[in-house]
Image: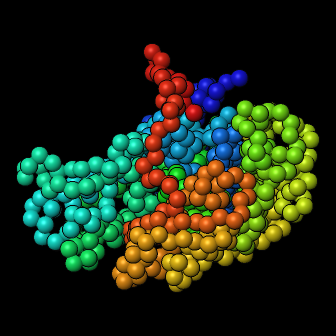
Amino acid sequence: MKTDIEIAQSASLRPITEIIAPLGIDFDDIELYGKYKAKLTAKKIKDLESQENGKLILVTAINPTPAGEGKSTITIGLADALSKIGKKTMIALREPSLGPVMGVKGGAAGGGYAQVLPMEDINLHFTGDMHAITTAHNALSALLDNHLHQGNELGIDPRRIIWKRVVDLNDRALRQVTIGLGGPLNGVPREDGFDITVASEIMAILCLATDLENLKERLASIVIGYRYDRTPVYVRDLKVEGALTLILKDALKPNLVQTIYGTPAFVHGGPFANIAHGCNSVLATTTALRLADYTVTEAGFGADLGAEKFLDIKTPNLPKSPDAIVVVATIRALKMNGGVAKDALSAENVAAVETGFANLARHVENMRKYGIPVVVAINEFVTDTAAEIARLKELCDQIQVPVALASVWANGADGGVELAETVVSTIENQPARYQRLYDDGESIEEKISKVARDIYRADKVIFEKKAKTQIAQIVQNGWDKLPICMAKTQYSFSDDPSLLGAPTGFDITIRELVPKLGAGFIVALTGEVMTMPGLPKAPAALKMDVDADGNALGLF
């Protein structure tokens, strides 16, 4: 059996100009990055504003397990299947992160015969968007430290700088660092730290900005720290938003690629919904809606994180809300949620499917709270048995949710036809009536409590002393009417990654709140979640290589 990278390398790529021609995109509307990648021009995006919006399909999933669930694979396979049944379709995906791919999966390009191509490029440097974000972010840090060195005219308190540096790598040794050592010539000593690039505020800003002017305004609104008198310091106080916008001007343009079956796809925006925004960019999703009759996009990690952020943070910035939500599940992952060990997942266990179904059922119920119809996609594995599939379908029938098998990893577009037809039928027969979970005008505590209670099913929220102090400061500065971006483990509804299934009887602990005014939300950090994760004992990089002809090996 071929690996993902082997399948991708054996696929026949068409020039990107051919892929986009049916969408009405001409040569002058794109900026080419080789033969198979391009960026859409700002002018073309502007010209499309008068076009009607097509249908929007949001793909999310149950809580991830080591058994896998396959959001990106289903997203791509569903889009290919929609194209196969005659629907004009586009994909809007997040961009994988280089660093975590070298350690753990961080955003995906799909798998098997449901991939976006060129897979190697997309998983590595692609068009350089991640590098531009890293550079802009660290440029701001350098300019800030230079301001301190040159006399600190703004009176910034070095002890109260909240802006961190970033790198597109998982490197736990960089979580806390001390900079400026070695005497006056080397700047002002202070504590600093690194986050991963995809968890950065500038990543979120890129995802939510609507044009260059909006990008500049968002960058200007970033809070970098506080003065000695405790008043906030913004990027506009440093007068460097223009320089940062210049660094990011090309990265803001959505990236165009193709699937194995030739479906056009935007790949643009950041992964990691457990610690960040975790959605495709507003520009890419909006543009796809105006170019196609059906747009398929995804939200990172479990629906309790990615889909919640998509619906409460991103959707208000889109021209329309989703028409349907697809919740992806695998028999294997449900069995793991039902208590089966990873090395025993291949054995038939209908009882474990029944127990693990509680996780899927809760996600379905949660998504319905937004007034949007839900479809369950069973991402098939060869180890799934007829009895397990039949029981899962019965359980879905009991909660009256449409369910379809999808074998897109193995069979590509053909394996997604049942799912595509089910989704189209659902959209045509069940109109969506979108409603947010909370109003921005509610207090910070109320917004967090609604997410914790209604989505996670926590008994209560515990705000640690530091969080309470920060809430008071946020209220004092008038920032409390922003939405909340919850940072939580992706593995559980709770903030304890070991509690699988549909846990009850737990509390959610908020340890810290960080204002992200450029992005337009407040980050609430729960439990032990890290914005600079570490690498596992055996990083994926150990399996990666390149042959004498320059072909990537071991990439996934």
Q: Position of residue 554 (x, y in %)?
A: 55, 26
x 88%, y 55%: residue: 395
Total residue callouts: 0
Looking at the image, which residue is at 73% across and 54% down? 501
155 left or right of 378? left
In this rendered view, identify the residue nearer to me: 264 or 195.
195
Residue 555's spot in the image, x, y percent? Answer: 54, 30
Taking the spot 64% from the left edge, 27% from the top edge, the residue there is 3
Q: Where is residue 396 in the image (x, y as percent from the top left)?
A: 86, 57
Outermost residue toward the top in this view? 548
Compared with residue 144, is residue 474 higher up or lower down, i.e. above or below? below
Q: In which quarter of the image is the N terminus?
A: top right
Q: Can residue 474 be seen in this view?
A: no
Left or right: 270 as drawn, with respect to 376: left
Asked where in the image residue 219 lies, by quadrant, the reply is bottom left
Q: How is the model colour-coded?
A: rainbow
Query: Quick one: quadrant of the C terminus?
Result: top right
Viewer-proximal residue among 25 and 390: 390
Image side of residue 191 versus residue 329, left or right: left
Q: Is residue 80 above or below residue 60?
A: above
Please name the residue shown 26% across and 71% down the image: 226
Q: Nearer the viewer, residue 214 or 14?
A: 214
Compared to 367, does 4 lie above or below?
Answer: above
Q: Where is residue 404 in the image (x, y as percent from the top left)?
A: 83, 50
Left or right placement of residue 58 versus residue 128 in this view: right
Residue 482 visible here: yes
